[in-house]
Image: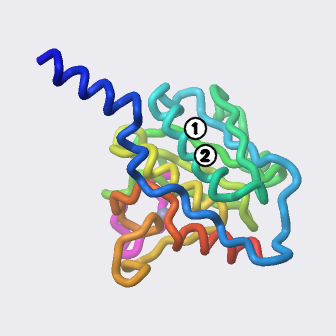
Amino acid sequence: MRSISILLAVCLTTGCAATLPAPTPVPWEPGAQMVPQPVHVFLDATLSDSIQQQARQAVEEWNVALGGHLHLQVVSGIPLQAYTEEYSRQHNDILILGVEFSHPMIQRAHVPGGNVSRVIAVTYPYGMAPGALIYLATDKVRYPHDTILHELAHALGAEDRDSNCLGGKVCLMSRTYSGISYIDADAATQVAHHFH
Ligand SMILES: [Zn+2]
């Protein structure tokens, strides 16, 4: 038993997740506009420590992919009820709010077929990205890191893929949770096109 627990510890500390593909760099086109100011990603004070940590990790992965053209900066522990839609619209901020599945902003999600029963998060972008309200149904989400990675892509201008992409494979932007845990070429390319 002792050796098993040591092996497990090694696996955790060296990061089994390191076997995941690295974030795909956003293929910026020559002359693509850089965003000079950091884009703040506010984390709701009601989010658990675990979800906040996974959100930080997702943000860092996007920063690697964005390659400095645009930089996301986490601001945590904010009681986001104090912020209004108008505030976000003016500041290009990204707000990640933790709510229950029954919350109106989850229930009013636009889903093909109108069935919201499988919705675990919704992003409401403001005009041109960046800048969005992300509502996370914390009582439904099972893989916060992957879901936040997907929703941050929306906040950066990427759209859902209704069917599979990239040669029939699932992708980060598949509308239904696909198990993709990293920034893939499709998501990175969508962001580059958005800021073209
Ligand atoms: Zn989506």
Which residue: 16% across, 15% down? Answer: 2
Whether label 1 touches label 2, CB < 8 Å: yes
Identify the image quadrant of residue 154.
bottom right
Query: What are the residue bounds of the magenta stretch?
Result: 105-116
- CB of mark 2 near ligand 1 (< 8 Å): no
Q: Quadrant of the N terminus?
A: top left
Which residue: 65% across, 44% down? Answer: 95
From the viewer's perspective, tell me whether residue 134 is left or right of residue 69. left
From the viewer's perspective, tell me whether residue 89 is left or right of residue 50. right
Residue 69 placement (x, y as % from top left): 78, 59
Which mark, residue 59? 2
Residue where numbered disc 1 is placed: 56
From the viewer's perspective, tell me whether residue 34 is left or right of residue 195. right
- Amino acid type shown at disc 2: Val
**In the rendered image, the vertical position of residue 99 relative to residue 187, given as above or below:** above
Identify the image quadrant of residue 12.
top left
Taking the magenta stretch, the answer to whether it contains residue 92 is no
Q: Residues within 10 Å of mark 2 (few under 14, many from 20)?
A: many
Which mark, residue 95? none
